[in-house]
Image: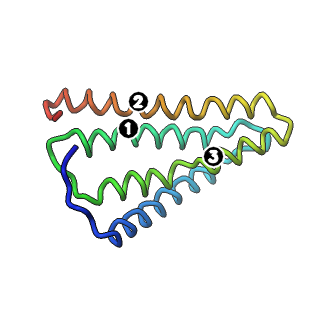
Amino acid sequence: MHPRAPLPVAGVVVAVAVGGALGAAARYGAGLAWPTPAGAFPWTTFGVNVLGCAAIGVLMVLVTETAAVPHPLVRPFLGTGVLGGFTTFSTFALDTQRLLAAGETLRGLAYLAATPVAALAAVAAGTAAARRALAGKGRAA
């Protein structure tokens, strides 16, 4: 990990807020582009969460395991902000509740189990892919 001086709190808050707005808007846009019919498996939210987790894996390798020290606001802006706003535990929980309330018990339980498993696998895959890419370029720290 790279040593860093403490950042002014206001700058971090602004970076997270702006990034979060962008990430949430992208997630909302995905929901508009690929809406989930009532009672159906929420593939859009599932995909957004898995894609966001893969991106988090890549980002963390890039900001913590490379020789180049990124700007100190990169991680709060992209990680907490953009990717935190893009991925969504609240929609995952609401989708699960709606499926269960609609009597779609098997689908709801499958979604409940598959999302965290796929999300963790995506973080691992993103991390591994980023490390391979960096090692192939001879830039891993």
Marks 2/1 in contact by CB < 8 Å: the verdict is yes
Q: Residue at x 63, y 46 (%)?
A: 34
Q: Residue at x 47, y 52 (%)?
A: 84
Q: Residues within 10 Å of mark 3 (few under 14, many from 20)?
A: few
Q: Earlier in the sequence, mark 3 or mark 1?
A: 3
Choose top left, top right, bottom left or bottom right for residue 134: top left
Q: Earlier in the sequence, mark 2 or mark 1?
A: 1
Q: Amino acid at mark 2?
A: Ala
- Which residue position is annotated with label 3? 34
**Total labels drawn:** 3
Q: Residues within 10 Å of mark 1 (few under 14, many from 20)?
A: many
Q: Name above or below for residue 6 compared with residue 3.
A: below
Which quadrant would the N terminus be assigned to in this image?
top left
- Which residue position is annotated with label 1? 57
Query: Element under label 2?
Result: helix
Q: Residue at x 53, y 60 (%)?
A: 25
Q: CA distance from mark 2 to mark 1?
A: 6 Å
Q: Nearer the viewer, mark 3 or mark 2?
A: 2
Q: Name above or below for residue 34 compared with residue 135.
A: below
Task: Tell me residue 27's x, y (percent).
Answer: 55, 53
Marks 3/2 in contact by CB < 8 Å: the verdict is no
Task: Tell me residue 40's x, y (percent).
Answer: 75, 37
In the rendered structure, the answer to whether residue 52 lies left or right of residue 75 reads right
- Which residue position is annotated with label 2? 124
Query: Element under label 3?
Result: loop
Which quadrant would the C terminus be assigned to in this image?
top left
Colour approach in the figure: rainbow
Task: Tell me residue 7's x, y (percent).
Answer: 27, 65
